[in-house]
Amino acid sequence: MELQRKPAEGRFVGRAIVGRPMAKARPGAMPIPAERMVQAFTSPAALERWGEDAAGVRALAPGDNVVTMFDMIGEDFWSGGGVTAKKVSQQLRAIGDRPVEVQINSPGGDVFEGLAIYNVLREHPQDITVKVMGWAASAASLIAMAGDRIEVGAASFIMIHNSWVVAAGNRNDMREVADWLEPFDRAMADLYAQRSGQDAAAIAKWMDAETYMSGSIAIERGFADGLLPADAVKVDDAARASDRAVNELRALELTLVSGGMTRAQARSRISKIKGTPGAAPEDATPGAGDEWTGLAAELLANLKS
């Protein structure tokens, strides 16, 4: 997290790198900070695991009432895309007063953007069916809870954890960041509890442990209502290569920031090696994606050694 104290105000500003229900009523709105200067993201380790296990998973038959979330949550510097509340609102307006299907395969991203998207979805007047095609991790798992019905693939995962940030400063700074994040972690645990019927204290422990729930476990614990048919999803090789290539760059950026760089410095360093951000198109060839995936993976390995 890039932090600086405002001398006149003596506070921090900055950016950070945060029984089974069936046809159950969607929970209420979630709190969103008035000041969006802090962002909580998926950790580099989770990004790497998503790249290995879920990259390229797509739906077989998208329809005209479908909202797809096959990207990071929040604006994404590296792909030039990302799932935002503004984009989802536009899609819902285009769909109109009809039931909506939300297809998710996302490693997560900005948790506060995820909260905003959740709130946008819960205000839709018709039923929402959420289908977890690959992963609904971190911020994407919050979005999934907006569904009146949640379906998950047998080999898919819902991952929940606490707000994850990178912060710098002394012990007082760390306490301030932790105190600022605590109400949002508590609110997320309450949301999961309301949707699943599980005890909020038990869910808080699962969040502490960064818990991955397979399809059957998610249903058993009330985080989903049913399994997706096996023939509802496919793995697109070109999309997988593109997903992995961009995902390695995201993980590398967070790793560099964890080592003390600002996000601007990390992006500049990576861009000098890679080239122009967002240059890899959605239909990138597997070979091109593998080239940058290998380079980013090598750099990550060197940083960890």
Image: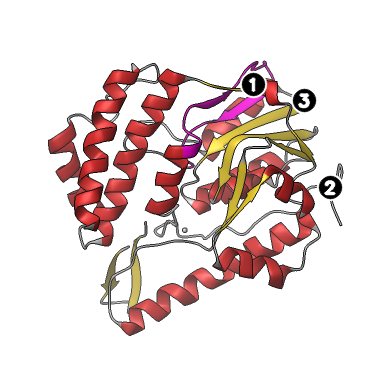
Q: Nearer the viewer, residue 239 or 302?
A: 302
Residue at point 45%, 52% (across, down) = 42
Q: Quadrant of the C terminus?
A: bottom left
Q: Could you tell me which secondary element the residue under label 1 belongs to?
A: helix
Relative to residue 243, is residue 139 depicted above or below? below
Residue 18 picture location, percent across and down: 47, 58
Relative horizontal placement of residue 223, taking residue 266 as reference (left or right): right
Q: Amino acid at mark 2?
A: Ala
In the rendered structure, find residue 285 and report the number of the disc placed on it: none
List the residue tagged with mark 3. Answer: 97
Residue at point 37%, 26% (across, down) = 242
Residue 22 picture location, percent across and down: 87, 44
Q: Could you tell me which secondary element the residue under label 2 belongs to?
A: loop
- Report, in whole angstroms, how far the alpha carbon at label 2 lies from the one at label 1: 24 Å
> Pointer 2 and pointer 1: residues touching (CB < 8 Å)?
no
- Report, in whole angstroms, how far the alpha carbon at label 3 lies from the one at label 2: 18 Å
Q: Earlier in the sequence, mark 3 or mark 2?
A: 2
- Report, in whole angstroms, how far the alpha carbon at label 1 lies from the one at label 3: 9 Å
How would you rate the neighbour count of disc 3 (Cα within 10 Å): few for under 14, some for 14-19, many for 20 or more? few
Residue 221 picture location, percent across and down: 76, 55
Q: Amino acid at mark 3?
A: Asp
List the residue tagged with mark 2. Answer: 25
Q: Amino acid at mark 1?
A: Ala
Q: Could you tell me which secondary element the residue under label 3 belongs to?
A: loop
Residue 290 in view = yes
Relative to residue 24, is residue 230 depicted above or below? above
Instruction: Tell me the mark number nearer the camera, choosing from 2 and 1.
Output: 2
| Magenta part, dominant SS | loop
Relative to residue 214, is residue 152 depicted above or below? above
List the residue tagged with mark 1. Answer: 94
Q: Which residues are magenta?
A: 53-74
